[in-house]
Amino acid sequence: MSRIVFDRVGRTFSQGGDSFKALEDVTFEVAEKEFVAIVGPSGCGKTTLLRMAAGLEFPTSGAVRVANREVHAPGPDRAVVFQQFALFPWKSVDENIGFGLKCQGIGETERAKKVAHYVALMGLAGYERAYPHQLSGGMQQRVAIARSYALDPGVLLMDEPFGALDAQTRVGMQEELIRLSRLNPRTVLFITHAVEEAVYLADRVVVMTPRPGRIDEIVDVASIRHAEGWDGKERIEEVMDQESFIHLRTHIWKLLRAHRDAGKDGH
């Protein structure tokens, strides 16, 4: 199993002799092969939660478990895709995709076969020998996602992976991720500031409060998606025109706006 569980998670940071609480009593889970997005205001602890699941940070209270084991360090069962593409500039596309496999001791023949599979899956055929500086931002992020998938992780952790892309490229990558998640599903935790992106991609959307980050509401998108029949084959503009999508987007925006307005009023 590759379920992610956040169990009463809290996180306090120290800064300049002072301390501040970033997260408080956060409890939710991401089921196996479920796609969950987290949205919330800047500083609410979204990325901190993802880094805890990755084993890069740790809670000061509560626990984070993946596959029923408490997370104490990074592991090959989890792959992370960051906003910055984090490719090796001196390695070609196929070398970047195969890097993790090589570190795992996968033989050259099997490694080449896996790399070729993900090159084809991500629409990178013909660019195998290209270097990152020769690729567009969208293509670089495809390489980063292919590298993560090639490791065959049970869990994919994505921290605003499309945040640095222009609007048109971002839409293309969202559609690409939907296609890939249908073909090769993983347990996905996805951080984003874009409400539309969260609703389009996720099965559920976790809406967080301002710092200290708590869960405001968890919005079930999958049941509405299934009921309305948008199954990932439609283009994003076709989905965004649907009344059910507009309702979900508006509901989440109202939750976020309520906290922002409360903050302005000093509450």
Image (spheres, rainbow, N blue to C red):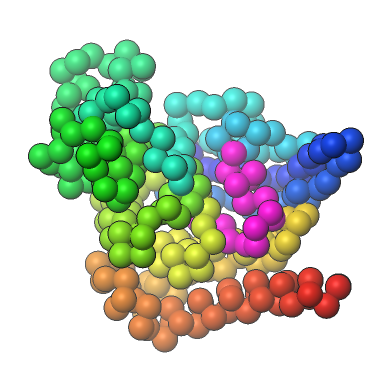
Residue 97 versus residue 239 in the image, above or below: above
Residue 37, percent from left and from top:
51, 57
- Which residue does the image show at 30% across and 65% down from the upper left? 168
Could one spot residue 114 in this view of the protein? no
- Which residue does the image show at 77% across and 45% down from the upper left? 10
Q: Which span is picked out in magenta?
A: 35-51
Whether residue 217 sits left or right of residue 198 in the image: it is right
Residue 106 versus residue 84 in the image, above or below: above
- Which residue does the image show at 63% across and 79% down from the upper left? 254
Whether residue 263 sits left or right of residue 225 in the image: it is right
- Tell which of 266 and 5 is nearer to you: 266
Could one spot residue 83 in this view of the protein? yes
The residue most toward the right is: 17
Which quadrant would residue 163 be assigned to in this image? Answer: bottom left
Residue 89 versus residue 110 in the image, above or below: below
- Tell which of 129 and 7 is nearer to you: 129
In reply to whether residue 49 is colored magenta, the answer given is yes
Residue 4, percent from left and from top:
56, 43
The residue most toward the front is: 133
Residue 219, percent from left and from top:
57, 68
Whether residue 126 sits left or right of residue 188 in the image: it is left
Whether residue 20 sits left or right of residue 102 in the image: it is right
- Which residue does the image show at 76% across and 42% down from the upper left? 11
Number of callouts: 0
